[in-house]
Amino acid sequence: MLLAVGVARGYKILLFWSVDSDSRTIELVKRNVAHARQQGGRGCCDVMLAHYSGSPRDWGGEWYANQVKFTLVSPGYKYNLLKKAYRQALSRWEDEYEYVWALDSDIDFTSVDLIALFSLARASQSLIVGPTFTGTQSWLTYTMSMHEVSAHGDTKRLVRRGEADSTAERINVLGKPDPRCKLRHTDFVEMTAPLLSNKVLALILKDCVDCVHDKAEWGLDRVWCKLAQKLVGDVAKPCALLDAAPVAHLDWKKAVVTPDFKASELAVKSEYPEYWSDIRNIDCVNDFKDNVYVAEPVPHASANVSAPLSSEASIQPASK
C-alpha cells in the first residue's frame, strides 16, 4: 500500500496545505485527499488545513469532520503557518509522522503513483525531498548576486547575472523531470511541495529562527539543504528530486509578490551565506540493488534535458 512502510513503522504522513476558500482550491484538495486514501487506505495519512483566508465552514461540515484532523485559522504564508502549527501541536510530530508533505494548494497529485513516489523518497535517503513538476510553472527569485530568472520562450532558465547570452552559463530549473534519472540528489529543493522528513522538522520549523520571515518566506529553500547537511548529521545528501514521480503544478499564481519577498530572500542570504545553495545536481540515480542506491556517472547532457550533472557518484546504504 501507499505508505505501508511508514505505517508499519508506526508513522503516518501529514498532508499539510495552506488554503483559501476558492472553489477550485476546495475541489482540488478534496480530490487529492481522496486519491491518497484510495491508494494508501484510511490510515495512510492525516490532513491539516491552515486557513489563511476563509473558514473551515466553507469546506462542508461532513467532509471536514471526516477528513481533516488539524485546523489552523490565521493569516500568513505557508511556512509561517507550518511553524505555528508545529509549535502549537499537542504531541511531537516527530513521534507520529515519517514526513510532513508541505503542499501548495495548486499541486495536483491525483494522477500520481504515490506508492512509487514515497518509495523513491525513502530510497533517496534524503531529508528534504521534492517531486518534480509537470506543467508550465515559473520559478522566481530576487537574488541579485549569482542567479536570476530569465524567460526564453516557454522555458524558464536560471541565468548568471550579466551573462544572459551565454548558453554555457544557462541551466534549466531543476524542478523539471529529467528522463535520465529516477531521482537526483541536489543542493536545492524549492518550497512548493517538499516532503520534510521528521528528522529535519525541528531544524526548519523551530531552530532556524531567521529562515522564515513574518511578511514573506523567500530564501528558506536556498539554505535548508546545506543547513540540514551541516546540522542534522549522518546525511551526505540531504536533498533530492524525484524524476520518476512528477506531480502537476497548476501554478495559479495566488501569492502577490511584494518587496517583502526580495527583502526576505536577501536577509536569509545575509544571515546564512555559507549555506546558500548553488542550485545544482549532485548525482543521477537509476538503480537500486539490495536496498542501496547506485548513483550513476554523469549522463551526457543535451539541450532537451535539465541541468548538467556533477561528476559525483557513490553507493550508500539505504535507511533502515
Image: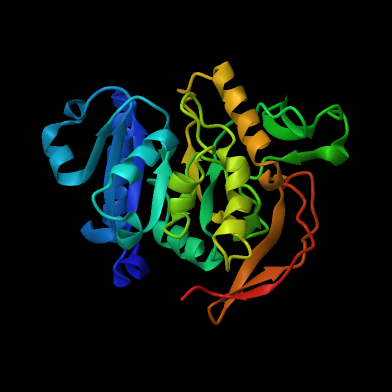
Q: Where is residue 41 in the image (x, y as percent from the top left)?
A: 24, 59
Q: In this view, does 184 lie to the left or right of 88?
A: right
Residue 106 appearing in the image:
no
Nearer to the camera, 292 or 35: 292
* Residue at the left extreme of this rendering: 62
Q: Position of residue 177 (x, y in %)?
A: 61, 49
Please say if 123 is above or below 224. below
Nearer to the camera, 161 or 138: 161
Q: Where is residue 267 in the image (x, y as percent from the top left)?
A: 62, 30
Residue at image coords 48%, 48%: 207
Residue at image coords 62%, 23%: 262
Residue at image coords 13%, 41%: 65
Please say if 271 is above or below 233. above
Q: Is residue 248 left or right of residue 110?
A: right
Residue 25 appearing in the image:
yes
Nearer to the camera, 245 or 184: 184
Nearer to the camera, 208 or 315: 208
* Residue at the bottom extreme of this rendering: 290
Residue at image coords 59%, 61%: 182
For residue 261, what is the image quadrant? top right
